[in-house]
Image (tube, helix red, strand yellow):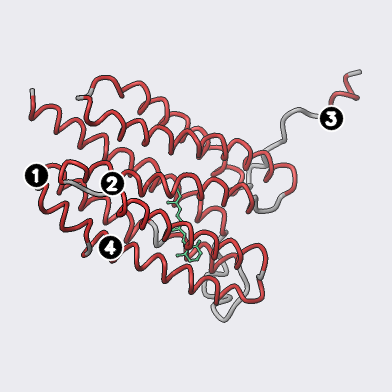
Amino acid sequence: MENFLLSFPLIAKLATNDYVGFTFFVGCMAMMAAAAFFFLSMNSFDKKWRTSILVSGLITFIAAVHYWYMRDYWADFGESPTFFRYVDWILTVPLMCVEFFLILKVAGAKRSLMWRLILLSVIMLVTGYLGEAVYRDAAWIWGLISGIAYFIIVYEIWFGTAKKLAVKAGGAVLQAHKMLCWFVLVGWAIYPLGYMAGTPGWYEGLFGGLSMDVVYNIGDAINKIGFGLVVYNLAVVATEEKA
Ligand SMILES: *C/C=C(C)/C=C/C=C(C)/C=C/C1=C(C)CCCC1(C)C
């Protein structure tokens, strides 16, 4: 009996040198903790900010669930859980676009701004998926198209309508917007590096030593939790100012 159970273990063994598996494991825990933190703190804020904090919670919660699956997938098959990865992103990245809209609503942000950002993020991710999973031989072309969509997002929030609204709102909202802009410019730039490390192309070898999944996992932890904390901080400051 004992031997029988041992041949069908319920949990996969994590080798001590499995850095990828380790980052999936820790990433999962970090996302769970962050989600609990955002959900539980939600009601201590002024009504106006609750939806923003709720969305921070949803982003990390959705990621936690996907990390649970990705951790398993990696442990069982030892390969990148590309499908789960992109399902996670296609849900969470648009929600990050919603965050921009929500904090800029005080300055009169329109839904069209939100939909524009969401559409760009979907283009960025779908083309990335095509390059990474479907047309790997042409990965650099799909990566380039994805990168263009990414740059338009960066332009929009740094210099476009979103920026103008942030300036109009001023104060804590402008500060938070600036921080989120930095996350998108620097934090999100981590992903194309992972992509180049994990797909074939002229850039091969440039990032050869890096593991795509480790890069993506670090990017996710920084961006999803960091983004949420910026919004959390805004809610704290704005609620205090009012009190
Ligand atoms: C929580 C997940 C986040 C914030 C994921 C963001 C993903 C990106 C910014 C991905 C960008 C890519 C490019 C700009 C080019 C190569 C393909 C991608 C999809 C990795």
Earlier-in-chain disc, 4 versus 1: 4
Are there few (<14), some (14-19), or many (20+) residues within 10 Å of tag 2?
Answer: many
CA gap, disc 2 and disc 3 = 48 Å
CA gap, disc 3 and disc 1 = 58 Å
- Quarter location, residue 159: bottom left
Q: Amino acid at mark 4?
A: Glu
Give the labeled residue for mark 4: 156
Marks 4/2 in contact by CB < 8 Å: the verdict is no
Give the labeled residue for mark 1: 171
Earlier-in-chain disc, 2 versus 3: 3
Q: Nearer the viewer, mark 2 or mark 3?
A: 2
Are there few (<14), some (14-19), or many (20+) residues within 10 Å of tag 3?
Answer: few
Name the residue nearer the viewer: 81 or 169: 169
Earlier-in-chain disc, 3 versus 1: 3
CA gap, disc 4 and disc 3 = 52 Å
Measured as percent of width and height from the top left, residue 138 is found at 62, 76
Give the labeled residue for mark 2: 101
The answer to whether 94 appears left or right of 230 in the picture is right
Residue 236 seen anywhere in this rendered image of the structure = yes
Q: Secondary structure at mark 3?
A: loop
**Which quadrant would the C terminus be assigned to in this image?**
top left
